[in-house]
Image (tube, coloured by chain):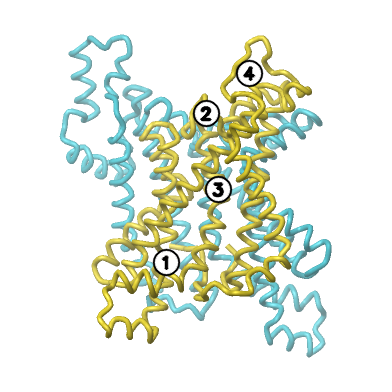
Amino acid sequence: MTVNVIEPAIAPMKSDFWPKFRRNRNAIAGSVIVTFVVLVAIFARVIAPYDYDETDILFTWAHPSSEHLLGTDALGRDILSRLIVGAQVSLTVAFAVLGITLTVGILLGMIAGYFGGKLDAAIMRTVDIIFAFPDIIFAILLASAMGPGIVTVIVSLSVVWWPGIARLTRSLVLQLRTELYVDAAIASGTPPFVILIRHFLPNIVAPLIVRASIGVGFIIMAEATLSFLGIGVQEPRPSWGGMIRDGIVSLRTEPYLALSASTALGLTIIGFNLFGDGLRDILDPRIKDR
Amino acid sequence: MLSYALRRLLGLVPVLMAVILLTFATNHMTPGDPVGTMLGDQSANVVLAAKLRAEYGLDKSLWTQFTGYVAGLAVGDFGLSYRFVGVRVTDVIWDGLKISPVLALAGTAVAVPLGLVVGIFAALRRNTIADTGVILALTAGISIPNFAMAAYLVYLFSIKLAVLPVAGWGNFSQAILPVGILAIAPAAYIARLSRTYMLEVLQQDYIRTARAKGLRERLVIYRHALRNTLVPLLTTIGIIFGGLLSGTFVIETVFNIPGLGRLAIQSIFARDYPVTMAIVLLFTGFYTLINLAVDLLYGIVDPRIRLGSR
């Protein structure tokens, strides 16, 4: 089957990171957006002008005003407040999935690459099977079986995301396997686990960071897709995907909900992707365009 | 070549079996008794319940159900639908089967030429304002999810300008927005890659040779550079097609198109697992075959890849 060709390049973190960063417009533009969204997410409950769940039946579908800057939705809830808390929901899912997939993917990838043999075969066949499903269709299937909710989204996206990390880690480890310092460590009796953590991990971290930062945008998109389809994050908790689904049916008369949630979602993913592209150029120019 | 193709095809069997097992297990993991749902207000009718249970094979062990399911798949039988009691899954999905592949193929047909033209345009104007503008637009095209794109474009074209229908399926104007939106992300992806590959190819010695012998620039680009750009692009067609397949879930839901994607989502909510399962397996099957075809084609187009030696 076809895989994304990410040429694994092995280069430790370089000390000229900041000068390169300052010259990279993508990285700067991306980090401005990312920082903004992360701050909004962290302080969501403080900056949201209203409670995201506060309904007002007498004030439904209000147009933007000084009271409700982006208007209200079908239940009279403040759209801006729901967008702000939606950022928190979106990033919580994204970073949880990232944390789980990096831990599982790196661990299994290192085991597969370092020990080889039956362990390698078992791990890589599992990877092949999950890769056999197109795009996020397996996540959709899993989410539908588990019943909707934020935990479901995190679990089902983690299941389809770790194989990519594991495959990349394995190929990076295989390249390092023949290095002299690895032989030296083995010869001096260092336990395999210590070799993996002390000698492999620092040397494969740069391409993994790049891969992870490019992944955030796609995870946010996947969460929004599940929520849009109705099998992701559930009401009353706001999610951008769910808000777009609610808004798109009343687009003709009340466009603010769908359009503002689409803008928040689109800009956030653009920010993370610009940031990821920038990091890739800085840390690892040899990794091919994905 | 033929033996390689056969070996690859055989190698897919265990993977596809595992996919079927996984899909089957996922669906049987779900709580709730399908017979209870089917009975509706006749839930007290024990005789009918037993009859349905026997008809659907639900009285047998899970393993027997699974082997029976696989044996059915081998002859194109996906079993019976839970939502439409007694109706074959093949009959439920038949109409959608005539729509979703058309949608995905139309999306590919728009995305590939569009992406190539934009990518090459940008590569030939490297580091100009036009190039920077194109790159920004491509990042937006890859980043903005199709349903968010749909919200913007439906609002603009169907509501503000009122030149295209809001939803539906059947005539050409109804196809413009769904196909167009489905094509945006893959087109942007192809454009980004073809720009990168084109820039790489333009630095090769044979391009310098072609220019040195006085070949006109158009011929250098179209005869020498373009052809070599296309080869690596071929490998991405599998990923693109996979994205289009899952894209139909969203786009068909947004535009109310009676295809397999919308049916899959409806079946999830109706707990019609046999239908969901059939659609997931069909899509995975299409995807696997496309990837196999791409791999084989790659060996034909690029003789440097020796297929036998894997």
Tag 3 secondary structure: helix
Q: Residues within 10 Å of mark 2 (few under 14, many from 20)?
A: some
Residue occupying image coordinates x 41% and y 45%:
A138
Residue B247 x %, y %? 55, 43
As drawn, B36 above or below A159: above
Residue picked out by circle 3: B244
Residue picked out by circle 1: A169
Residue occupying image coordinates x 71% and y 63%:
B119
- Residue flagged by tag 1: what amino acid is it? Thr
Q: Is there a contact, CB below 8 Å, between mark 4 and mark 1?
A: no
Q: Which chain is yellow?
A: A
Q: Nearer the viewer, residue A75 or B72?
A: A75
Residue occupying image coordinates x 76% and y 78%:
B220
Both on one chain, marks 4 and 1? yes
Q: Is any part of residue B255 visible from this angle?
A: no
Q: Nearer the viewer, residue A65 or B72?
A: A65
Q: Which chain is cyan?
A: B
Q: Residues within 10 Å of mark 1 (few under 14, many from 20)?
A: many
Task: Find the distance from the CA under tag 4 to the CA under tag 3.
Answer: 32 Å
Tag 2 secondary structure: loop
Both on one chain, marks 2 and 1? yes
As drawn, A266 above or below A198: above
Q: Quadrant of the N terminus of chain A?
A: bottom left
Residue occupying image coordinates x 24% and y 67%:
A118
- Residue flagged by tag 4: what amino acid is it? Ala
Q: Quadrant of the C terminus of chain A?
A: bottom right
- Can you tell which of label 1 and label 3 is closer to the viewer? 1
Q: Which mark is residue A74?
A: 4
In the image, taking residue A105 as reference, residue B262 lies left or right, namely: right
Residue B109 x %, y %? 63, 52
